[in-house]
Image (cartoon, grey):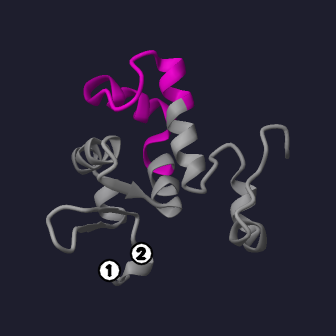
Amino acid sequence: MGRSLQNMMAWSQYPDPAGTVYFEIDVADADRLSHLFDLAQVHRAYITREGWRAIWERFGLAGLLAMNKDGRWFDPDERLAAEQILHRSRVAGYDPAHPAVESKPALREMGLFALAGDS
């Protein structure tokens, strides 16, 4: 698969002027993902819906919480960190609790997301 912008998982503004495009291989690597979270924490990077999907599939909540213990991008309290991680993912358009919405492109294109009680 080529490394076109269609395969972009995240983007950061550094280095100037064009920034850095992150692909699936980048977000699958814990060290690169850690660096990306450092940048995203201070609003210098953005993780796409596809990026969050790849991150959830690779690391899951337990893996993300373990990474957060070292990086502290989210709250040190695991319950709050889990809520914050889920929130960031949902804001980008990916809800790991309701992946069925991902199979409904018309809803996704309209910006509609599943609600907590939907199934």
Question: Foreground: 74 or 51?
Answer: 74
Question: Which is the main secondary structure of the residues drawn in magenta?
Answer: helix
Establish if 51 lies above or below 115: below
What x and y, as percent, mark residue 31?
22, 45
Badge 1: how crowded within 10 Å, few (<14), some, or many (20+)?
few
Q: Quadrant of residue 113?
A: bottom right
Q: Quadrant of residue 72?
A: top left
Task: Check if residue 45 falls in the magenta segment.
Answer: no
**Residues in magenta?**
57-83
Question: Foreground: 47 or 25?
Answer: 47
* 3D distance between C-alphas at marks 2 and 1: 6 Å
Q: Amino acid at mark 2?
A: Asn
Is there CB contact under 8 Å for labels 2 and 1?
A: yes
What x and y, as percent, mark residue 41?
33, 40
The residue depicted at 42 percent of the width and 28 percent of the height is 65
Q: Amino acid at mark 1?
A: Arg
Query: What residue is disc 1 on?
Result: 3
What x and y, as percent, mark residue 2?
34, 84
> Which dot marks residue 7?
2
Task: Check if residue 66 falls in the magenta segment.
Answer: yes
Q: How many numbered dots are placed on residues in this image?
A: 2
